[in-house]
Image: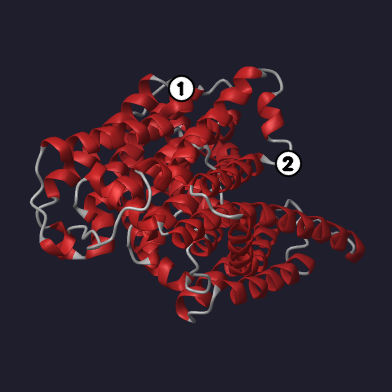
Amino acid sequence: MEFLNFVLAVSPIVLVLAGILLLKKPAMKVAPVALAWTVLLAFTYFNITGLAFKENVAVIDALLWKGIKEGLKIVFMVFGAFVILNTLKRTGAIEDVKNTVARVSGQDRRVQLIIVGLMVPIFLEGAAGAGAPAAIAAPFLVALGFDPITAIAVALLGDATPCSWGGAGLTTINGGASLVEAGISTNALNSAMVGRIHMFGALIIPFIMVAMAFGRKGFKGIIPYLCYAGVTTGGVMFLLSNFVGPEVTSMGTGLIAILLSVLFVKVVPIKTPEEYKYQAPKNVKQRYGAFRAMSPYIYMLILLPVVRYGVPAIWPKTGFAFLCTFGYIFWVDCVIFICGLLGAATLHVKKDELFEIFRVTGGNVLPVMITMGSLLVMAYIMQSGTTGMMSLIAGDIAALAGMMYPAAAVLIGSLGSFVTGTGLGSNIMFAGMHTEAAAALGMNPITVFAGQNAGASLGNLICPNNTVAACATVGEVGNESKVMKRTLAAFAIVLCVYMVLCMVYTLVLFPNFGM
């Protein structure tokens, strides 16, 4: 009976994965089917609170409208990111963007991949979070000439580590609030321990990215740079998370890593094979200066942190609450859209041209609403206390783990963000459970929660919501299966590393950390 409970509870997730990966169906077709199955379970097998039919309808109806509302917010972000890409294409500024990045980062396309695919998302996660990094980095990589599927997979992988801190450290601060309130830990300790896990993720991810984009041959002549990029990014992440605090870890790591990487390519010559050199188009005059061509992205790099940190600084008591008036993600959506408008103005796009860009972009992102709404409602139903599906899944995994519980915490964290689409949601959902389990097993709750937090960040890599949103920004809606096949392999590698680290930290190296 318990096994049947688990199988049925996890069946919506299996249905999504099987539909996308095995049957190769677009997420827009799979998501509504998975939602319908989840609703059926909620009305029947998982009506654990014994609600009457009418009461259950009221619960599902509320979750349905919540999913539509939150889905619209994500679609708005995708719309803004796509407006920027379409503006660059229409004006021809894309070629100037390529040339500008090449001048700054060198002619090696693998270096461009690491800077834009890893370091920029880390910065953007700290500046804004809320899905912005992949939605911005993927179109940027496409603008640089990378295959769209590769661009999406790399951008999602680049955001796999900084999500543990999120915008201004919120994922660690709010996600670990139950440990802090219970006097078990502090924000500083929670940040420090998860940083000790993610620094190894930052070390190996550059290698995975190159393999993902260029294959085994892509490592020729670039290994010294990849080692440097991994060590400096991971090292800065460790230092900031352990000695500064969660608020600036992600944004600071991204910014410093970019500067150090640019310094490396300026000082240390890289012997780049011809096939990996960026080939500037011949006989093409530069239409815009570097600032004008890059203006939408420059505005974003400035305005996202300015708004995120400036508004609360100006209004300490109400500033952050103001940003969250319509949900945290909404202010990010608005800033990205405004940056698109500012970029269009800087590039002297005429009003009629801008409206045409809006029209084309609207047609590109409209199907995303069906997918995002369906997946979000499915997640809300599974998280709901009236069904208990997510709690049952996590509880069964925990009960089976025993002394392997620290590794299980990483897996549970990943599962939570796979379903919810956010590391914060996963942390809030499971932090209390991990604290109780650690106490029962005589383990350090701080290191166990760090495993949960790291896994929650990593789960964003394969989350269907994030995959669909990133696909939409580069016009690849319907090709989610191609992306997930690539990201699942990367996810499996980093997941295994994190599970081993959490076991070693909890049982061997830091059994008394913070206690």
Residue 192 percent location from the top left of the image: 39, 27
Residue under numbered circle 1: 188
Q: Which mark is residue 476?
A: none
The answer to which of 130 and 147 lies nearer the viewer is 147
Residue 30 place in picture, x, y as percent:
59, 75
Kindly identify the residue that appears in the image at 19 percent across and 53 percent down. Answer: 108
What colouring does the structure picture have?
A: secondary structure
User: Mark 1 to mark 2: distance in Å?
Assistant: 29 Å
Mark 1 touching mark 2, by CB under 8 A? no
Residue depicted at 60% across the width and 30% down the height: 178
The three-letter amino acid code for the residue at tag 1 is: Ala
Of the residues under marks 1 and 2, which one precedes in the sequence? 1
Give the side of residue 43 with respect to residue 111, left or right: right
488 versus 206 height, above or below: below
Callout 2 environment at 10 Å: few (<14), some (14 to 19), or many (20+)? few
Q: Residue furthest bottom?
A: 23
Image quadrant in which the N terminus is located: bottom right
- Nearest the camera: 63 or 54? 63
Q: Position of residue 448 (x, y in %)?
A: 45, 37
